[in-house]
């Protein structure tokens, strides 16, 4: 009985360590490292239509950056997102977000924030990110207004870093 308990404990520890590992690079048949270093590996082609993702947001009117919305978005981001995302180019649990408004359409960003489970099930970019980061983004029950405020914070941050 003790050996059985030790075996379960051993396999549990191994499973935990493997699930928490950074994933390291994988080599393809030619020996090249295939680890993605950022989430911008998806590059739409000229024949690709506008990538807005799947979800309730179909169009976003962007005007000048609204500092009030950005301030609300910053609070929301810090409360709900920073356990997995950092404002950097480095991978954390999820991708670093510097430049996200340059890489993704505003509708895609808002849909990813609002319905990440639907996005990873149906959107090719979100599927690719899930395959890269191996972690499903948690649905935080963000409303469209909250997502718009977070998007405004992202726009403000990207404008300040470029």
Image: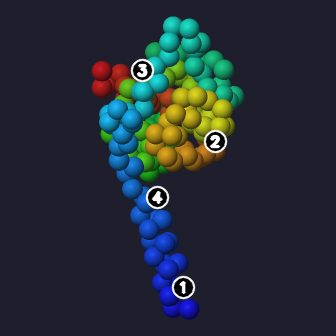
Mark 3 vs mark 2: in front:
2
Q: CA distance from mark 1 to mark 4?
A: 22 Å
On the image, numbered disc 3 is attached to which residue? Answer: 102
Q: How is the image coloured?
A: rainbow
Secondary structure category for the residue under label 4? helix
Q: Residues within 10 Å of mark 4 (few under 14, many from 20)?
A: few
Quadrant showing the N terminus: bottom right
The x and y percentages for residue 76 are 50, 42
Q: Is residue 83 found left or right of 117 in the rendered image?
A: left
The disc label shown at residue 117, or none: 2
Q: Which residue is mark 4?
A: 19
Of circles 4 and 3, which is in front?
Answer: 4
Which of the two marks, 1 or 3, is nearer to us in this view? 1
* Disc 2/disc 4 C-alpha distance (Å): 20 Å
Residue beneath disc 1: 4
Locate the C terminus by quadrant: top left
Looking at the rendered structure, the secondary structure element under dot 1 is helix
Mark 1 touches mark 4? (CB < 8 Å): no
Q: Position of residue 7 (x, y in %)?
A: 50, 80
**As displayed, is residue 156 above or below residue 5?**
above
Do tag 2 and tag 4 residues touch (Cβ < 8 Å)?
Answer: no
User: Earlier along the polypeptide chain: callout 1 or callout 4?
Assistant: 1
Look at the numbered disc 3 and give the secondary structure of its residue: helix
Check whether the beta carbons of the residues at disc 3 and disc 2 lie within 8 A of each other: no
Q: Position of residue 52 (x, y in %)?
A: 60, 21
Within 10 Å of disc 2 (Cα), the crowding (few <14, some 14-19, many 20+) is some
Residue located at (54% from left, 44% from top): 137
Taking depth in this image into account, of 161 and 135 the one nearest to the observer is 135
Q: Is residue 49 above or below residue 87?
A: above
């Amino acid at each position: 009985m003790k050996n059985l308990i030790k075996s379960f404990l051993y396999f549990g520890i191994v499973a935990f360590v493997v699930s928490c590992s950074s994933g390291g690079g994988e080599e393809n048949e030619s020996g090249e490292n295939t680890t993605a270093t950022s989430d911008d590996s998806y590059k739409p082609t000229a024949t690709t239509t506008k990538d807005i993702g799947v979800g309730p947001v179909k169009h976003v009117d962007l005007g000048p950056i609204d500092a009030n919305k950005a301030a609300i978005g910053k609070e929301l981001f810090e409360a709900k997102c920073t356990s997995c995302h950092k404002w950097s180019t480095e991978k954390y649990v999820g991708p670093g977000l510097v430049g996200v408004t340059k890489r993704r359409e505003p509708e895609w960003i808002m849909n990813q924030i609002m319905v990440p489970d639907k996005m990873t099930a149906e959107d090719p970019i979100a599927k690719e990110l899930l395959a890269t980061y191996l972690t499903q983004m948690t649905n935080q029950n963000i409303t469209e207004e909250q997502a718009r405020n977070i998007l405004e914070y992202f726009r403000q941050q990207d404008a300040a870093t470029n």
